[in-house]
Image (cartoon, grey):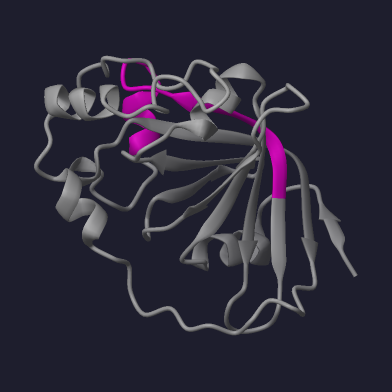
């Protein structure tokens, strides 16, 4: 039933770009380390950069497991499920990296997204280079309706500036380092480029 793809284009790209949410899975190299699985949403925060590369905006939160795992080993899987329409699941297995505000690629990467990241406490852009692209049937995925994005994240973090956001992260146990003690988000945050 499943199919392997050489590239992200055509209907596959359209499917990925149309989904209102996706999931990100990472793990440390340690066999007893904590596997992480995170849901991601907010329309406009994921972009297909080319036929083998996707990126998404990494916003403020109470941990930084994905960032820590990617800094250690780069392994990542992204997954999209069709919750409406024909059943489908798409996975991109690849190598990822967090690109931080002080990286020279930052301004060019931000041009790919159709959303204002300012109110969300943007801390990194996660760039994933696909190594294996597959889909499967998704017959057991339930049908659910998408109403709208929540506005809570933007309402919470819109009041933060670089200094207060860095202080917020410093107060969280698993932002500067992961649950397993791996280096997480570099603090203090580099200033937002203007």
- Which quadrant of the figure contains the N terminus? bottom right
Q: Residue at x 35, y 25 (%)?
A: 106
How many numbered tags mark residues here?
Answer: 0
Q: Magenta span has 104?
A: yes
User: Is residue 68 shown above or below 17?
Assistant: above
- Where is residue 119 shown, x and y percent of the image? 18, 45
Residue toward you, 168 or 39? 168
Residue 60, position as x, y percentages in the image? 31, 38
- Give 140 or 16, whichever is nearer the viewer: 140
Name the residue at the right extreme. 1
Left or right relative to 120: residue 36 = right
Q: Where 178 falls versus 113 (above or below)?
A: above
Q: Would you say residue 191 is visible in this rendering?
A: yes
The answer to whether 84 is drawn above or below residue 130 in the figure is below
Q: Is residue 51 left or right of residue 169?
A: right
Highlighted range, magenta? 92-110
> Image point 36% across, 80% down: which residue?
147
Residue 121 is situated, as x and y percent measured from the top left of the image, at 24, 38
Q: Magenta segment: does it hold 151?
A: no
Front residue of 136 and 167: 167
Place residue 29 in its image quadrant. top right
Q: Residue at the spot x=11%, y=30% of the render? A: 161
> Where is residue 81, by image quadrant?
bottom right
Q: Nearer the viewer, residue 167 or 46?
A: 167
Residue at the (36%, 38%) spot, across then down: 62
> Would residue 193 be visible to someone looking at this image?
no
Q: Quadrant of residue 95?
A: top right
Q: Is residue 17 left or right of residue 157?
A: right
* Quarter of the image that includes the C terminus: top left
């Amino acid at each position: 039933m499943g199919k392997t793809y050489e590239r992200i284009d055509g209907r596959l790209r359209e499917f990925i770009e149309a989904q209102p949410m996706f999931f990100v899975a990472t793990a440390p190299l340690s066999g007893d380390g904590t596997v992480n699985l995170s849901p991601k949403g907010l329309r406009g925060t994921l972009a297909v950069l080319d036929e083998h590369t996707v990126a998404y905006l990494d916003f403020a939160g109470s941990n930084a497991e994905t960032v820590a795992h990617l800094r250690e080993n780069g392994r990542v899987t992204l997954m999209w499920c069709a919750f409406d329409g024909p059943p489908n699941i798409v996975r991109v297995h690849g190598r990822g990296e967090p690109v931080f505000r002080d990286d020279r690629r930052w301004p060019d990467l931000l041009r790919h997204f159709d959303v204002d990241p300012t109110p969300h406490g943007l801390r990194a852009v996660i760039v994933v280079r696909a190594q294996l692209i597959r889909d499967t049937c998704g017959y057991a995925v339930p049908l659910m309706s998408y109403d709208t994005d929540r506005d809570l994240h933007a309402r919470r973090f819109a009041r933060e500036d670089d200094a207060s956001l860095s202080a917020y992260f410093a107060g969280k146990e698993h932002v500067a380092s992961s649950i397993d003690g791996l280096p997480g988000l570099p603090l203090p945050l580099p200033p937002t480029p203007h």
